Image: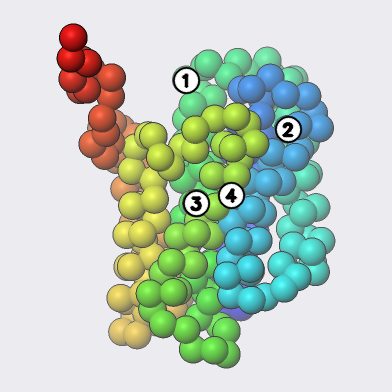
Amino acid sequence: METLVFWLEIIGVTASSVSGAFTAIRKEMDAFGVVILGLTAATGGGVLRDLILGNTPPKIFRDPTYAIIAIAVALVTFIAVYMHKLHYRSKLYDIVMLFMDTLGLAAYTVSGMGVAYAQPQNYSTYLIVFVGVITGVGGGVLRDLFAGNRPYIFVKHIYALASLAGALTFALLRSAAGEGFSMIAGMLVIVVIRLLSAHFKWNLPKITGEDAEPPAK
């Protein structure tokens, strides 16, 4: 179980670092900004997870592996985009960003739950699902705030709900199907929902300026 969680965290770090780097590039940040945003996106959710679970100092400060991978991936992403002159308004850019953001969300949601299940305190399912969602979306929220954007989770496509659906899938299947299978199933649910929502442009209802009534004269 620990090995699976470790590799899922590595996947989450890698994918989230790419999404953070892409966001920084789109905001026309320099190489340092790209690295910082990549690191923030890759480790922010894990830091929030550890603080909620009382694992202090957070794992990123006890094991430099995750920070090193995040920084390296962000730098490679910056160099690759620079060398290939990939414009941030291109279709390929949007596809890579969607895929990496989705993969990071899926991997971090289930790995966050795996860490919570491994704690000796025997936490409730409610708390473990909450921790999974926070781990999944936390890095992306911090990434967007650092970039000066409204967090993606609040404005576009099915994001947090996809994480919640995957977390519930993991929790419901865990007793009957085992942790390995249920984690993979939870990830697949998140990936499928996210990709379908992006393809069909599914969004939650929201009130826009067109919906509001004009002020009375």
For image coordinates 63% across by 18% down, the residue present is: 86
Q: What residue is pinned by disc 3? A: 137
Q: Are marks 4 and 1 in contact (CB under 8 Å)?
A: no
Quarter of the image that includes the N terminus: bottom right
Residue placed farthest to the top in the image?
A: 217
| Residue 93, quarter of picture | top right
Residue nearest the viewer, comparing 211 with 156: 211
Instruction: Mark 4 or mark 1: name the one nearer the start of the chain.
Output: 1
Q: Residue 34's mark? A: 2
* Label 3 to label 1: alpha-carbon separation: 24 Å
Q: Give the residue at mark 4.
A: 139
- The three-letter code of the residue at mark 3 reads Val
* Circle 3: element type: helix
Q: Which mark is residue 91?
A: 1
Q: Nearer the viewer, residue 209 or 62?
A: 209
Separation of residues labelled 1 and 2 (CA atoms): 20 Å
Label 3: how many residues lie within 10 Å, few (<14), some (14-19) or many (20+)?
A: many
Q: Are marks 3 and 4 in contact (CB under 8 Å)?
A: yes
Of labels 3 and 1, the one closer to you: 3
